[in-house]
Amino acid sequence: MSCKYLFFILPVLFMNCKKEVALAYNNQQDSLKTKVIPINSPKSIAFDSTALWDKPEHVKEFYRNNLFKTVWTETEDRKALIDIIKNSADEGLIPEDYNFSSLEKQEEAKTKLNSTEIVNFDILLTESFHKLANHLYNGKLNPKQLYTDWETGNKKIKAIDLLQEGIRRHDVEKTLDTLKPNHPVYHLLKKSLKKINEMPDDDFDPIVIEEKINPNEKKATIKAVKKRLIYWGDYTKEDTITNLTNIYDKKTVEAVKHFQKRHGLLADGVIGANTVTAMNVSKKQRTEQIIANLERWRWFPRDLGKEYIIINIPEFKLYFIKDNDTARVHKVVVGKDTRRTPVLSSHLSNLVINPTWTVPPTIIKEDLGPTASQNRGYFAATRITIYDSKGQEVDPYNWNAAKPNNYRYVQKPGDNNSLGLVKFNFPNGHLVYLHDTNHKELFELTGRSLSSGCVRVENPLDLAYYILETDENYMNQKRVEKIIESGKTSGIPIKKFIHIHLLYWTAWMNKDEFQFRNDIYNLDSELYQKLRD
């Protein structure tokens, strides 16, 4: 099934890029320790190694490789770096983190600097390049130090080798450009940052409603709603703002639906609490949200594979990408804020048809234990078998409700199994997986952060059949249907290497339109503040 028209970013998301070859080559050099050829220039100034006594080891190594001589001897190289640092604001970074003012000032006074000052200037240029290179490639912050449930980031790079070749070839700008995410989403997100920065300041008072506003109603609030819709580009202004009426007319209804769709809300044209909350988010907050998402893109893997599943957690969507095209789209249910779905990259290992479900410790403590202690019939109703530490089956009426975590609980396969009829396994350190569910009604909801961490998939058997078909597996739909009918639990290995990526982004751009999603885990604001600390 072709879905090219769905979710514009995904058909071309994470395409391999020739620029990445330089990074891969660089990583090889990092491990092979090949001989470094010093940069020689008649303009170089030799200096004593004591000038580096308080510098990091990578800076010392760089100048050791270059025989303790200055390397930023060409004006074009220095200005290229300074210009890139200046433009790092376009990436959501802060130029002063890379000594922009100092470098610019010293470059302007270059002809007046003495030898010692030239050496110090040279070292500062090197330090600034190294820091910027690492931030462009890995992000300013390390997600593994911020969160316990993120398994992305911390990619390998040896910036001093890149600098060595960049100066030798006099293509410092191109060298740094290869480090940036080269994905349409990232480029369009940068475009959205530029667009929002060019927008006038918003000075709106918060919109307040006492009850939902339906089409054709006349409310004083509607004029404020129209102004907000005009500001964000959802409402085409034909009349002057002073001529706007308080009637919730057809044109405004369509504009509200457009706004709702851009924010992942139910596009019903009814102005309710969720719509008003989204309208009351300021330009400043949206700018911070975009910058936070730019940082996350630098954390994400550069290459997600030829065939992969990608799940955008705040969007509640799963996409199967094959040959740079969106082959399938499924709604998903993800973890609630108190039991978050982790961000990670892995690969599918196998499918399980008619899976059993072993109840995880958190659910034992917070759900099963309290419920079953009030009603021992809970186990029969849910078809859960209790096992003691020796693997012996325990009668529910001999079960010690005071110590529920001393037991293992396994739910039999079937339609009412919490995992449904199919489970998708992939190696990870968080014990999460994709699966069917016996609560199909949840997919009708707009906000679907409702699970205990695993990802529930709508129409999962269709996804399973597609995977098996593309995998050229000995299993096909008819065989799977027979297994389901048998009620027996069966594992099916996946032969192809199909990546799976659970990612988190709340802002992107669709053509020239902003797209925002609810920050379900409240990560955006905190991340932005840490980026600005």
Image (cartoon, rainbow, N blue to C red):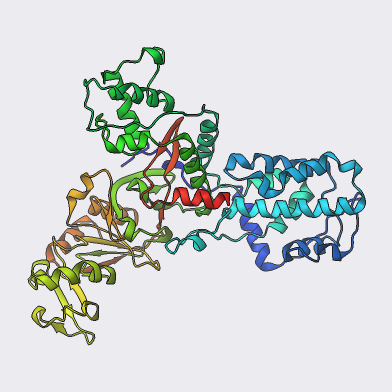
Above/below status of 87 relative to 455: above
Instruction: Kindly indicate the quadrant of the structure image that contains residue 396.
Output: bottom left
Residue 472 makes an appearance in the image: no
Residue 160 makes an appearance in the image: yes
Q: Position of residue 123 (x, y in %)?
A: 79, 55
Residue ID at (39%, 12%): 239
Q: Position of residue 375 (x, y in %)?
A: 9, 70
Residue ID at (41%, 55%): 501
Q: How many marks?
A: 0
Frontmost residue, 82 versus 40: 82
Residue ID at (20%, 74%): 409
Would residue 488 appear left or right of 173 to someone viewing this image?
A: left
Above/below status of 186 relative to 117: above
Frontmost residue, 359 versus 282: 282
Q: Position of residue 136 (x, y in %)?
A: 61, 50
Q: Position of residue 189 (x, y in %)?
A: 50, 39
Would residue 286 appear left or right of 210 to someone viewing this image?
A: right
Image quadrant holding the N terminus, namely top left
Frontmost residue, 434 versus 325: 434
Frontmost residue, 452 versus 465: 452
Would residue 199 appear left or right of 77 to someone viewing this image?
A: left
